[in-house]
Image (cartoon, helix red, strand yellow):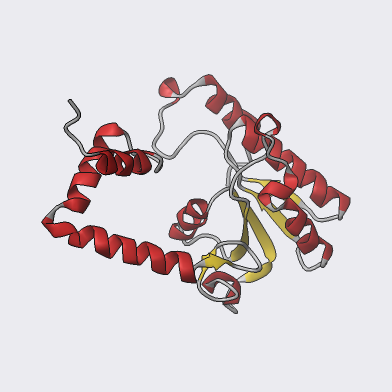
Amino acid sequence: MQVVPPRIAELVTALRRLPGIGPRSAQRLALALLGGEGELARQLAQALEQALEYVHLCESCRMYTEDTLCTLCASSQRDRGLVCVVETPADVIALENTASYRGIYFVLYGHLSPLDRIGPSDIGLDLFAQKLGEGNVREVILATNATVEGEATAHFIAHLCQQRSTPSTRIAHGVPMGGELEYLDGHTLTQAIQGRRAYD
């Protein structure tokens, strides 16, 4: 006998598609949203509707914004000659939280993956090539993830940069702050050794 009505089951299934949400979490969220006469669900539905209507991609970096340009691209305090390429908006937020980067970004919304039929134009690299062609970029920082796909994407972008005589650099990968060598995997240690730099 099915205890949960079909529409709640559909809601649970939809919530499970969100990153980091498993079956039990999805069920808890669904029941919480419907509790209290559904007031929370109505607020969430309204917020989602507003976001879908007014939020779009920045014309320059493809970060989420409600204006033509996002707050970072519109700021006169940012260095427009320095472009950091990332895979997701969450990466932009993470880097901004460090308060150590003053350039602008370009968000790919993914990475190259031939097996999944995700090519350069699917992640906006045609637009990125146009940006490089404008001649205002003096350095591209490749901050894609340290995965096989992320490395392949970084290599592809580095080739684009090379074709346009624009220097590109790769973010360092390796030992995290506070990490102990004996607990790190071999790949991380290899990256750390290969990415070593002069000691200041």
Residue displayed at 55% across by 61% down: 101
Front in this rendered view, residue 8 or 1: 1
Instruction: Write down the quadrant of residue 59 in the picture.
Output: bottom right
64 left or right of 160? left
Identify which residue, 177 or 48, lies in the foreground.
Answer: 48
Residue furthest to the bottom in view is: 76
Q: Residue 39, position in %: x, y?
A: 19, 62
The residue shown at (47%, 62%) is 99
Q: Residue at x 74, y 50 (%)?
A: 168
Whether residue 114 is visible to the viewer of this picture, yes or no, is yes
Query: Does residue 180 lie above or below 145 as drawn?
Result: above
Nearer to us in this view, 67 or 164: 67
Q: x, y (%) of residue 106?
A: 64, 58
Query: Where is residue 65 drawn, in percent x and y?
Result: 52, 69
Q: Is residue 186 left or right of residue 152?
A: left
Q: Quadrant of the N terminus?
A: top left
Q: Nearer the viewer, residue 118 or 30?
A: 30
Vertical comparison of 166 with 76: above or below: above
Specify the quadrant of the image occupied by residue 119: top right
166 with respect to 97 (left or right): right
Which residue of the protein is positioned furthest toward the left in this rendering? 36
Residue 72 image position (x, y, % from top left): 55, 70
